[in-house]
Image (tube, rainbow, N blue to C red):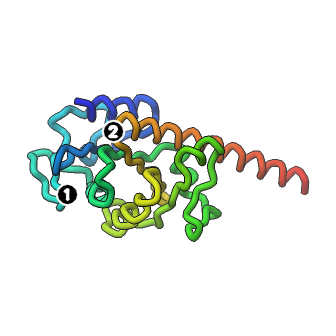
Amino acid sequence: MELVAAAEYLHQNRLTHGATGNISARDGDTFMISPTGKSLDVLEESDFARMDFFGNVLSQAQPSKEYLIHQKIYQARPDIHAIVHTHSTFATALSCLADIDLDDAVLPLTAYFSLTFAPVPIVPYYPPGDERLALGAAQVIERSPVLILRNHGPVVGAANLRSAVDKLEELEHAAQVNLLVRNQAYVTTKAAK
């Protein structure tokens, strides 16, 4: 199953850790989503819950507590067939910076990333599983298939799982570069004083 392989890849490449993160894939008028509380590197096909776009669980397996983000994005964007949400280190670190302006709702990133995916909207903070978080993600996903949840982590939607994972990796790299530049600018400013 492609979802199992993608989940394992995300964990092995340190794009998620422990039992964090969740992934899903559209399957006709339903979607399959990973469960809560289980590391992505040990998932089996039977661990994935099947849901409809109204939030009904159609399987024995139980979905991630953040299923609402996936559900609302699939409702808002019929062209998105896969969603990856992680707490990857660098994108999550950027999501916690107070100077990232929510009014502009654009994360400053590298030129290549900006040409490919910009803007990267930032969704205001709400606790995981909160419907307001899911509604915020669905609202900004219409502008960009790549977004960041404030103090939480990235969410990427794409036409397929491979593309979603690729976009997540590119976002993580751009976030790492952004943080390195910010750190250097801070060091330079401190040295000048």
| Side (left or right) of 159 relative to 88 | left
Q: Nearer the viewer, residue 55 or 182?
A: 55
Position of the N terminus, as image quadrant, is top left
Find residue 162 and report its horizontal and vertical position in percent. Answer: 37, 34
Q: CA distance from mark 2 to mark 1?
A: 18 Å
Q: Mark 2: few, some, or many residues within 10 Å (few <14, many ≥20)?
A: some
Residue underneath mark 2: 160
The correct choice, above or below, for 1 with respect to 39 in the image is above
Q: Amino acid at mark 2?
A: Asn
The correct choice, above or below, for 167 with respect to 131 in the image is above
Instruction: Say which residue appears at 49% left-offset and 58% top-offset.
Output: 151
Residue underneath mark 1: 53
Position of the C terminus, as image quadrant, is bottom right
Find residue 100 and report its horizontal and vertical position in percent. Answer: 61, 62
| Side (left or right) of 134 relative to 28 | right
Q: Mark 1: few, some, or many residues within 10 Å (few <14, many ≥20)?
A: some
Q: Are marks 2 and 1 in contact (CB under 8 Å)?
A: no
Instruction: Say which residue appears at 42% left-offset and 40% top-offset.
Output: 16
Find residue 83 and report its horizontal and vertical position in percent. Answer: 34, 46
Instruction: Say which residue appears at 43% left-offset and 51% top-offset.
Output: 145
The residue lying furthest to the right in this view is 192
Q: What is the quadrant of residue 42 in the picture?
A: top left
Q: Amino acid at mark 1?
A: Phe
Q: Which mark is residue 119?
A: none
Find residue 178 and report its horizontal and vertical position in percent. Answer: 65, 46
